[in-house]
Image: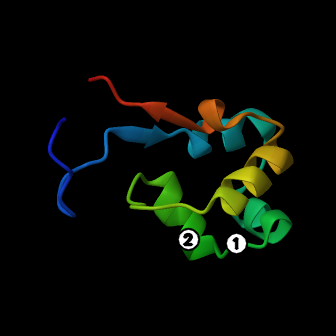
Amino acid sequence: MPPAASDEEESGIHCRLDELLADRGMTLTRLSELVGVSLVNLSVLKNDRARAVRFSTLRAICEVLDCEVGDLLVLDRS
């Protein structure tokens, strides 16, 4: 089993929120209003700095953006 990632290590998961918002012509501010999650928290997620995310948040984002979790979060294989 691989060692657990420390707080300083990257998770290897990339959030495609920026791309999905651009594809839909939506701002992060508008998404924040629609999903009821603070702009700061969505910004942390968008910039790949989140260390955890609630399933309810993922669900709300996916419902508003009409996407699947796998469209939003992808493994960074680089």
Percent x, y of residue 72: 61, 38
Residue displayed at 25% across by 49% down: 10
**Would you say 13 lies left or right of 20 here?**
left
Q: Residues within 10 Å of mark 2 (few under 14, many from 20)?
A: few
Furthest-top residue in view?
77
Residue under label 2: 41
Helix, strand or loop for disc 1: loop
The amino acid marked with disc number 2 is: Asn
Per the rendering, the mark at residue 22 is: none
Q: CA distance from mark 2 to mark 1?
A: 7 Å
**Would you say 8 lies left or right of 13 here?**
left
Q: Quadrant of residue 16?
A: top right
* Quarter placement of the C terminus: top left
Percent x, y of residue 14: 43, 39
Q: Nearer the viewer, residue 11 or 49?
A: 11
Q: Quadrant of residue 57?
A: bottom right
Percent x, y of residue 70: 61, 31
**Would you say 19 lies left or right of 46 here?**
right
Residue displayed at 19% across by 53% down: 9
The amino acid marked with disc number 1 is: Val
The answer to whether 10 is drawn above or below residue 51 in the figure is above
Proximity of marks 2 and 1: CB atoms separated by less than 8 Å:
yes
